[in-house]
Amino acid sequence: MLPLEKRFIRSDYLPFPDSAFWRVDYEYNNPFQFPCAANYYFQYTMGGDTVIQSHIYRKIYRSAVVADTLSCTDPTQIPVAPEVG
């Protein structure tokens, strides 16, 4: 049996800055029923905060939904951008 050594590394909490923003890419590809592909990306920003039961939470806003690629053989089957993501 080998001796095991446990080491814990402490990392300090670093909050997101108020000017933080990021992008989430969403890809939809259904090649079987009606060949269709769609790529969307979402822009997120942070702004303000709110208090719930004495805990402070940061607010996250989705500021943009951009359709990057839409390619479908049946134009009635184009997927819409998801409400969450």
Image: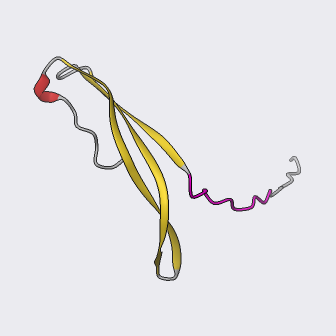
Q: Is residue 73 left or right of residue 46?
A: left
Q: Residue furthest left?
A: 76
* Stretch of the chain drawn in magenta: 9-19
Along the line of sight, the residue nearer the viewer: 51 or 63: 63
- Determine the image quadrant of residue 30: top left
In the rendering, at what x and y percent does residue 53 appear? 47, 82
The residue under the point 28% across, 48% down is 83
Q: Is residue 32 left or right of residue 19?
A: left
Q: Is residue 54 above or below residue 32?
A: below
In the rendering, at what x and y percent does residue 36 appear? 23, 22
Q: Is residue 82 left or right of residue 15?
A: left
The residue under the point 18% across, 23% down is 33
- The colour scheme of the drawn protein is secondary structure
Along the line of sight, the residue nearer the viewer: 43 or 13: 43
Along the line of sight, the residue nearer the viewer: 19 or 81: 19
12 part of magenta stretch: yes
Q: Is residue 77 above or below residue 35?
A: below
In the rendering, at what x and y percent does residue 1 appear? 86, 47
Q: Is residue 18 above or below residue 38?
A: below
Q: Residue furthest front?
A: 19
Q: Residue furthest top?
A: 73
Q: Is residue 6 above or below residue 75?
A: below
Q: Is residue 50 left or right of residue 18?
A: left
In the rendering, at what x and y percent does residue 55 appear? 53, 77
- Determine the image quadrant of residue 29: top left
78 part of magenta stretch: no
